[in-house]
Image (tube, grey):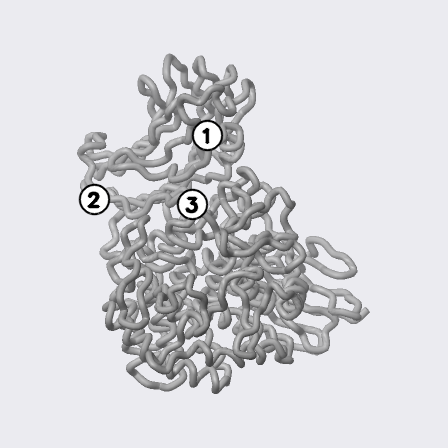
């Protein structure tokens, strides 16, 4: 560490191989710097005193599997102050400590309000890979006080990189939120992870990103999660779909789902999403629900014999819609859900899928597996080629296309479908961190890669799955915002629905959850442990975070009073989620209340709650259960599929008209886990996320 004329700087070097400089404090004017006694978990602690106030700098060095460094900077103003412009805090260095002599490249930087991440490699000199993460949660007090947000705060232009502390807009009179005198506030909470050498190709670069992000993740103080009664939510949702006039509409003598509350035209993606979710609910309950059959009855009306494919809209769609227009992903997602039904024995779904799938292949061939945003199904005329935000088309459609092809391969054993899946994934190679267009499509791409690896035994597909995962988590908000209305809900581990979207969306949330369930089911001991951990943590937090998409879980002031013009209205009495929650705390539900997102409750309920024959309870677990075996009349052995050193919430939930007796949970070595809390209705445990557990019980 060194003090310069205006800064205190941390240097990290490898002998003869360059390094980095990390600015810990930027002080205009004279200052003094003294070393303080480091506390038990610290490597160094310094105090910087100036006319502005006092900076305290804390460093924590770690050298487990990967070397890492944490730096926290806290500031106590001597008088009320609006901090001036702050430069970025990270510079790569050559052998002479000159940033201009360092040669390398940035692979990924923060996108919007997602994780404050920077991933780069320093090639000349050969320092290696660096992952820089700002724990933005620690700066909530600063953002709220100053009226700022960390939108794109971590990034930069080589060689000036790192975090730029957001400061109020210049010229605002009076200034927004000066920092109060005498109150300590965190200005930076940086985590750096290092690798000695540069990766040989994009797939290994992505794997290392996941691995290094896992190291950074483990250093965070993670927010807690709460038990969510998704079974009750699903029952309420099913009632509202069936009985609320805003949920369904009749055409051609059949019932169809409204995309939003009493708004928008029925489309095939919406129908299939709800049908597939209700189907899963019926399987879980042991009795199919009549609504599934009713909604299936009208699917054939979406089929166009002329083009031999499902269309987006019914034939009587209004003239305000282009009946021939389709988003690229919209063609394939209904096929995915038809595939699930077909693989579950639904012959009608199988027939509808197989008589539509050749058109999907025709489209893939026409666009050479590089799909535009939107086109006409009649002649493939491109309506919208690329997204304005990044000049790219729907780059991850090949992932969901590959999954659909693999479903068809499983149904028919026809190798041409396997070849199509491989061709689509092969065509996406080289996109690096630009794979993601829409979060759930990226998750299905990862699942397709994992399935391809299992089928072909070609390691390149396992490796390529990390490219999809890296792009997914690059767009993940790995911090808990308390800005604006976000104080009323949770966003930790939420993923923005599109690569340029300002919000998290419920549909992409639960569809990604479903894709990751498949990914983990196909994985094995060869899976990168950090990938298993991050996926498990995403899904665990989704079960908690998704609850706040429902209007009745939010205070009225946190809901937008207006929705998009064609997207209906919000009814707090209906158990349908709003589409949009915002990390920066804008009012939720600006887009609308999604009837088509109502499948979330069924997906979360059927994956997190587990029925036990004859027992007076159900088991709730917020990590995926790998296996569950009845080993006695009142004994279960449970294996969880979460990450190493992570936690899982396990709850024993009383069944209706039954009483909970005494339960005992032990880990594999025989240690008894004490309940976290208990009541007559539920007993909650915190258990290892990847452990083997033994549950025993006695009737009351």
The residue pinned by badge 1 equals 187
* Callout 2: SS: strand
Q: Residues within 10 Å of mark 3 (few under 14, many from 20)?
A: many
Q: Position of residue 7 (x, y in %)?
A: 35, 22
The residue pinned by badge 3 equals 115
Q: Residues within 10 Å of mark 1 (few under 14, many from 20)?
A: many
Q: Identify the residue at the far right of this view.
A: 700
Pick whichever of labels 1 and 2 is earlier in the sequence: 2
Q: Is residue 676 left or right of residue 149?
A: right
* Mark 3 and mark 2: Cα distance apart in space: 25 Å
Mark number, residue 276:
none
Q: Is residue 121 left or right of residue 190?
A: left
Q: Is residue 40 left or right of residue 370?
A: right
* Image quadrant containing the C terminus: bottom right
Q: Position of residue 577 (x, y in %)?
A: 57, 57
- Residue drawn at 74 percent across, 71 percent down: 616
* Mark 1 and mark 2: Cα distance apart in space: 30 Å
Q: Is residue 581 visible?
A: yes
Front-lying residue, 244 or 154: 244
Q: Position of residue 111 (x, y in %)?
A: 37, 45
Front-lying residue, 74 or 298: 298
The residue pinned by badge 2 equals 123
Q: Is residue 164 above or below residue 494?
A: above
Q: Identify the residue at the far front of this view.
A: 319
Q: Which quadrant would residue 417 be assigned to in this image?
A: bottom left
Q: Is residue 187 above or below residue 506?
A: above
Q: Which quadrant would residue 328 be assigned to in this image?
A: bottom left
């Amino acid at each position: 560490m060194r003090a310069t004329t205006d800064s205190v700087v941390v240097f990290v070097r490898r002998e003869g191989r360059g390094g980095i400089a990390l600015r810990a404090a930027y002080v205009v004017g004279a200052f003094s710097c003294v070393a303080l006694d480091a506390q038990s978990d610290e490597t160094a602690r310094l105090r910087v005193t100036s006319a502005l106030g006092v900076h305290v700098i804390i460093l924590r060095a770690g050298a487990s599997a990967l070397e890492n460094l944490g730096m926290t900077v806290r500031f106590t103003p001597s008088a009320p102050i609006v901090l001036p412009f702050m430069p970025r805090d990270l510079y790569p260095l050559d052998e002479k400590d000159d940033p201009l002599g360092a040669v390398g490249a940035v692979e990924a930087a923060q996108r919007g309000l997602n994780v404050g991440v920077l991933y780069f490699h320093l090639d000349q000199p050969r320092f290696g890979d660096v992952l820089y993460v700002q724990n933005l949660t620690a700066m909530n007090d600063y953002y709220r006080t100053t009226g700022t947000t960390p939108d794109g705060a971590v990034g930069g232009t080589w060689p000036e990189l790192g975090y730029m502390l957001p400061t109020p807009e210049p010229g605002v009179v009076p200034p927004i939120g000066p920092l109060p005198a005498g109150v300590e506030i965190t200005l930076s909470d940086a985590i750096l992870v290092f690798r000695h050498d540069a990766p040989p190709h994009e797939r290994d670069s992505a794997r290392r990103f996941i691995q290094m992000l896992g190291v950074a993740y483990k250093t965070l103080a993670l927010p807690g999660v709460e038990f969510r009664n998704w079974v009750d939510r699903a029952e309420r949702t099913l009632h509202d779909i069936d009985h609320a006039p805003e949920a369904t509409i009749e055409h051609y003598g059949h019932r169809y789902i409204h995309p939003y509350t009493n708004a928008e035209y029925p489309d095939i993606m919406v129908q299939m999403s709800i049908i597939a979710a209700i189907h899963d609910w019926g399987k879980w309950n042991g009795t199919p629900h009549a609504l599934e059959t009713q909604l299936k009855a009208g699917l054939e009306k979406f089929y166009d014999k002329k083009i031999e494919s499902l269309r987006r809209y019914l034939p009587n769609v209004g003239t305000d819609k282009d009946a021939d227009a389709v988003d690229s992903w919209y063609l394939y997602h209904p096929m995915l859900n038809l595939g699930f039904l077909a693989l579950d024995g639904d012959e009608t779904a199988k027939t509808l899928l197989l008589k539509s799938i050749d058109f999907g292949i025709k489209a893939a061939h026409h666009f050479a597996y590089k799909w535009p945003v939107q086109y006409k199904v009649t002649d493939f005329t491109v309506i919208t080629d690329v997204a304005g935000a990044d000049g790219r088309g729907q780059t991850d459609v090949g992932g969901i296309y590959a999954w659909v092809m693999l479903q068809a391969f499983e149904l028919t054993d026809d190798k041409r479908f396997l070849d199509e899946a491989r061709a689509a994934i092969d065509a996406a190679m080289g996109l690096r961190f630009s794979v993601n267009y829409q979060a759930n499509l990226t998750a299905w791409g990862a699942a397709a890669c994992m399935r391809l690896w299992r089928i072909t035994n070609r390691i390149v597909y396992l490796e390529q799955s990390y490219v999809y995962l890296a792009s997914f988590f690059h767009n993940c908000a790995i911090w808990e915002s308390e800005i604006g209305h976000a104080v009323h809900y949770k966003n930790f581990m939420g993923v923005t629905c599109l690569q340029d979207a300002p919000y998290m969306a419920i549909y992409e949330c639960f569809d990604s959850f479903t894709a990751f369930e498949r990914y983990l089911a196909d994985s094995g001991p060869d899976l990168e442990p950090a990938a298993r951990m991050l996926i498990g943590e995403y899904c665990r937090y989704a079960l908690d975070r998704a609850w706040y998409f429902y209007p009745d879980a939010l205070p009225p002031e946190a809901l937008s009073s207006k929705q998009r013009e064609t997207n209906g209205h919000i009814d707090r009495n209906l158990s349908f989620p709003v589409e949009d929650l915002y990390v920066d705390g804008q009012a939720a539900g600006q887009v609308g209340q999604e009837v088509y997102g109502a499948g979330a409750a069924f997906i979360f309920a059927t994956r997190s709650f587990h029925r036990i024959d004859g027992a007076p309870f159900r088991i709730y677990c917020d990590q995926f259960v790998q296996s569950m075996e009845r080993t006695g009349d009142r004994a279960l052995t449970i294996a969880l599929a979460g990450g190493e050193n992570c936690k899982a919430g396990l709850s024993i939930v009383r069944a209706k008209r039954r009483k909970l007796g005494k339960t005992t949970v032990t880990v594999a070595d025989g240690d008894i886990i004490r309940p976290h809390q208990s009541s007559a209705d539920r007993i909650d445990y915190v258990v290892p996320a990847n452990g083997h557990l033994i549950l025993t019980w006695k009737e009351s």
